Amino acid sequence: MQLRYNYRVYPTPDQQEALARAFGCARVVFNDGLRIRQSAREDGLPYVPDGELSKRVITDAKKTPERAWLGEVSAVVLQQALADLNTAYRNFFSSITGKRKGRKVGPPRFRSRKDNRQAIRFTANARFKVLDNGRLRLPKIGDLAVRWSRALPAEPTSVTVIQDAGGRYFASFVVAVSDQPLPPAGAEVGIDLGLTHFAVLSDGTKIAAPKFLRRAARKLRRLQQDLSRKQRGSANRTKAAVKVARAHVRVADTRRDWQHKLSTRIIRDNQAVYVEDLCVVGLGRTRLAKSVNDAGWASFTAMLEYKAARYGRTFGRIDRFAPTSQTCSACGRLDGPKPLNVRSWICPCGAAHDRDVNAAKNILAAGRAESLNACGAQVRPAPVPAQRREAGIRPHAACATRSVEGISAL
Ligand SMILES: [Zn+2]
């Protein structure tokens, strides 16, 4: 399994300049490639293959006076920018042909220097290196100071350097880690992700989002209001925007930590975990959007999924169209839709139900039924941010006490 490990990095002014150049070159190569494919399409010409595109926007372009400066950055950075473009195209194609499940993916879009997030990726070919003195050596950038909030558990296969909207820099390493099956647990659990509680478990446990998280989210909302009152293009607006960006990152960091603790506990205590496959994208467009987006269910279920895979547990998503809150979990009677304000009800069979716990019980039952005739292919999860405080062996320069790994990269 692949995990991401994120660390804050502190480039010197010279290195910041070199990074800005590399971000720019990666962006130009990406946009040049996109432009070529778009105009080929408009002219009714066939799709430009990856190899030919790479030759045109990197190898040949470097020989022209307009793009000679592409030679100033690592070639791997440019190739990886094109690889991103190719992936974006593949996702788009498999989405329109229906091969890709989930929400529809649009065609790739041009990157801008004003994007909130600038990033470049170095693979092993680029010979990036974590030095014995704890610095991160990047070709044509230099040796960057890293705050090793924890050790890397193994040799990384790639590193992405990111500048976020708050102007901070991060190195995000992808590390392959081995599975670590836990001793079997007796229990199985269904989880209802709700609006009144963050999650309700089929055993009756109700989990509210913690106070500190709600407070941080409130502060963020206030800062966003401040920002909206500032005049466009003013210096005060820029300052307010940086504050908002920083608060955003803090809320995301705090929420992720809390979700990690919760998901680890649930995975440790249960042999099988089932959740409802919420149409978060659909809900996000309704007036429930605010609380839905704040809740961060997608990241939470992704954590459950990768931890289940890593620790030898079963994880299943239940069809989101199953009427889990309308069905009696005791007798199976379908009792019709209930408005959100109906928190509890009594089924004609005599069973008294808490709306959310009943839903969680139904999710558990549906999950068990599905896993009995399981045939769905196992999907390999994409690299996800690793949990803090995981044991590691390197590098030796681990020293920081305050954990600052931020952002959920990619
Ligand atoms: Zn009943």
Image: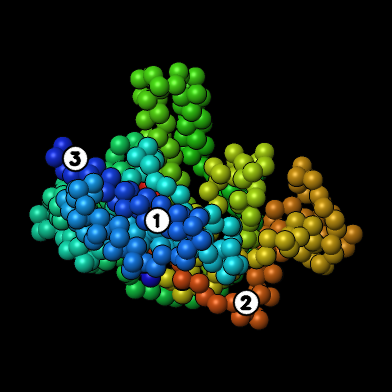
Image spot of residue 375 (x, y percent):
61, 80
Vertically, is 16 above or below 327? above
Question: Around disc 2, counting alpha carbons within 10 Å, would you say few (fewer than 14), some (14 to 19), or many (20 or more)?
Answer: some
Amino acid on which the number 3 mark rests in the picture: Glu
Choose the circle earlier in sequence order: 3 or 1.
3
Residue 362 shown left or right of residue 74 in the figure: right
Task: Name the residue located 10 percent from the left edge and 59 percent from the top edge.
Answer: 132
Question: The disc labelled 1 sits on which kind of residue?
Answer: Ile
Q: Are marks 3 and 1 in contact (CB under 8 Å)?
A: no
Cβ of disc 3 within 8 Å of ligand 1? no
* Image x and y of residue 74, in percent: 19, 56
Q: Which residue is mark 3?
A: 17
The disc at residue 36 is 1
- SS assignment at label 1: helix
Q: Say what secondary structure mark 2 lies in.
A: helix
Looking at the rendered image, the disc whose residue lies closer to the viewer, 3 or 1, is 1
**Badge 2 is on which residue?**
371
Please tell me the numbered disc located at residue 231: none
Q: Is residue 350 left or right of residue 395?
A: right
Whether 319 is drawn above or below 169: the answer is below
